[in-house]
Amino acid sequence: MKAPDDFDELVHSPVRLRICAALATATALEFTAIEDALGVSTSTLSKQLRLLADAGYVSLEKRKQVFGRPRTWVSLTRAGRRAFDAHVNALRRLLD
Protein backbone atom coordinates (compact mmCIF):
# COMPACT_ATOMS: atom_id res chain seq x y z
CA MET A 1 0.00 0.00 0.00
CA LYS A 2 1.37 3.37 -1.03
CA ALA A 3 1.42 6.13 1.57
CA PRO A 4 -0.82 9.13 0.79
CA ASP A 5 0.90 12.08 -0.88
CA ASP A 6 0.55 14.20 2.26
CA PHE A 7 2.26 11.59 4.47
CA ASP A 8 5.20 13.58 5.83
CA GLU A 9 8.30 11.52 6.66
CA LEU A 10 9.79 14.43 8.61
CA VAL A 11 6.77 14.77 10.89
CA HIS A 12 6.28 10.99 11.15
CA SER A 13 9.34 10.33 13.33
CA PRO A 14 7.96 9.42 16.78
CA VAL A 15 9.67 12.25 18.66
CA ARG A 16 8.91 14.87 15.99
CA LEU A 17 5.29 13.71 15.77
CA ARG A 18 4.94 14.10 19.54
CA ILE A 19 6.59 17.54 19.39
CA CYS A 20 4.15 18.69 16.71
CA ALA A 21 1.18 17.23 18.61
CA ALA A 22 2.21 19.10 21.76
CA LEU A 23 2.78 22.35 19.87
CA ALA A 24 -0.58 22.02 18.12
CA THR A 25 -2.27 22.48 21.51
CA ALA A 26 -0.65 25.83 22.34
CA THR A 27 0.52 29.09 20.84
CA ALA A 28 4.06 28.40 22.10
CA LEU A 29 5.73 26.07 24.58
CA GLU A 30 8.94 26.56 26.51
CA PHE A 31 11.77 24.14 25.62
CA THR A 32 11.99 22.51 29.05
CA ALA A 33 8.22 22.03 29.19
CA ILE A 34 8.41 20.04 25.94
CA GLU A 35 11.45 18.16 27.21
CA ASP A 36 9.64 17.19 30.42
CA ALA A 37 6.37 16.30 28.70
CA LEU A 38 8.07 14.06 26.14
CA GLY A 39 10.63 12.60 28.54
CA VAL A 40 13.51 13.09 26.12
CA SER A 41 17.02 14.38 26.65
CA THR A 42 18.02 17.96 25.95
CA SER A 43 20.24 16.87 23.06
CA THR A 44 17.50 14.73 21.48
CA LEU A 45 14.94 17.51 21.68
CA SER A 46 17.41 20.08 20.38
CA LYS A 47 18.31 17.91 17.37
CA GLN A 48 14.67 17.17 16.51
CA LEU A 49 13.66 20.82 16.86
CA ARG A 50 16.55 21.85 14.60
CA LEU A 51 15.29 19.46 11.89
CA LEU A 52 11.76 20.87 12.19
CA ALA A 53 13.07 24.45 12.21
CA ASP A 54 15.23 23.84 9.13
CA ALA A 55 12.10 22.60 7.33
CA GLY A 56 10.23 25.74 8.38
CA TYR A 57 7.81 23.77 10.59
CA VAL A 58 8.69 25.39 13.92
CA SER A 59 10.06 28.70 15.05
CA LEU A 60 12.44 29.05 17.98
CA GLU A 61 12.56 32.26 19.99
CA LYS A 62 14.99 33.08 22.80
CA ARG A 63 13.28 35.21 25.43
CA LYS A 64 15.22 37.05 28.13
CA GLN A 65 14.19 36.38 31.70
CA VAL A 66 14.31 38.75 34.66
CA PHE A 67 16.52 36.21 36.43
CA GLY A 68 18.66 33.50 34.91
CA ARG A 69 19.42 32.55 31.35
CA PRO A 70 17.19 33.25 28.37
CA ARG A 71 14.66 30.53 27.64
CA THR A 72 13.75 29.09 24.27
CA TRP A 73 10.10 29.14 23.23
CA VAL A 74 8.90 26.94 20.39
CA SER A 75 5.84 27.31 18.19
CA LEU A 76 4.46 25.70 15.06
CA THR A 77 4.63 27.87 11.97
CA ARG A 78 1.74 27.98 9.51
CA ALA A 79 3.64 25.55 7.32
CA GLY A 80 4.23 23.31 10.33
CA ARG A 81 0.56 23.34 11.27
CA ARG A 82 -0.43 22.49 7.69
CA ALA A 83 2.14 19.68 7.52
CA PHE A 84 1.08 18.25 10.88
CA ASP A 85 -2.65 18.42 10.07
CA ALA A 86 -2.09 16.88 6.63
CA HIS A 87 0.05 14.12 8.13
CA VAL A 88 -2.58 13.30 10.77
CA ASN A 89 -5.21 13.14 8.03
CA ALA A 90 -2.95 10.87 5.97
CA LEU A 91 -2.57 8.55 8.96
CA ARG A 92 -6.34 8.47 9.43
CA ARG A 93 -6.82 7.54 5.76
CA LEU A 94 -4.28 4.74 6.12
CA LEU A 95 -6.22 3.38 9.07
CA ASP A 96 -9.56 3.45 7.24
Image (cartoon, rainbow, N blue to C red):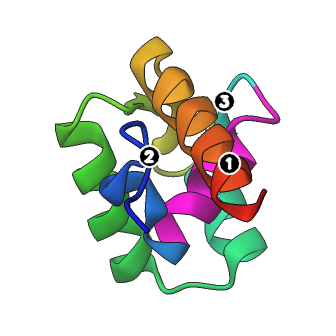
Q: CA gap, disc 2 to disc 3?
A: 29 Å
Is residue 24 highlighted in magenta? yes
Please provide percent x and percent y for residue 67.
61, 43
Task: Kindly identify the amino acid type of the residue bearing the numbered disc 2.
Answer: Pro
Q: Which residue is mark 3?
A: 28
Task: Kindly identify the amino acid type of the residue bearing the numbered disc 3.
Answer: Ala
Between residue 43 and residue 49, name the one nearer to us.
Answer: 49
Task: Kindly identify the amino acid type of the residue bearing the numbered disc 1.
Answer: Arg
Decide: marks 3, 1 in contact (CB < 8 A)? no
- Residue at 44% of width from left, 78% of height from top? 42
The range drawn in magenta is 15-26
Q: Which residue is mark 1?
A: 93
- Dividing the picture into quadrants, the one containing residue 54 is top left
Q: Which residue is mark 2?
A: 4
Q: CA gap, disc 3 to disc 1?
A: 29 Å
Between residue 8 and residue 51, name the one nearer to us.
Answer: 8
- Dividing the picture into quadrants, the one containing residue 37 is bottom right
Q: Is residue 24 left or right of residue 60?
A: right
For this orientation, the residue located farthest to the top is 78
Question: Of callouts 2 and 3, which one flags the residue occurring earlier in the amino acid sequence?
Answer: 2
> Which image quarter is the C terminus in?
bottom right
Decide: marks 2, 1 in contact (CB < 8 A)? yes
At numbered mark 2, what does the secondary structure look like: helix, strand or loop?
loop
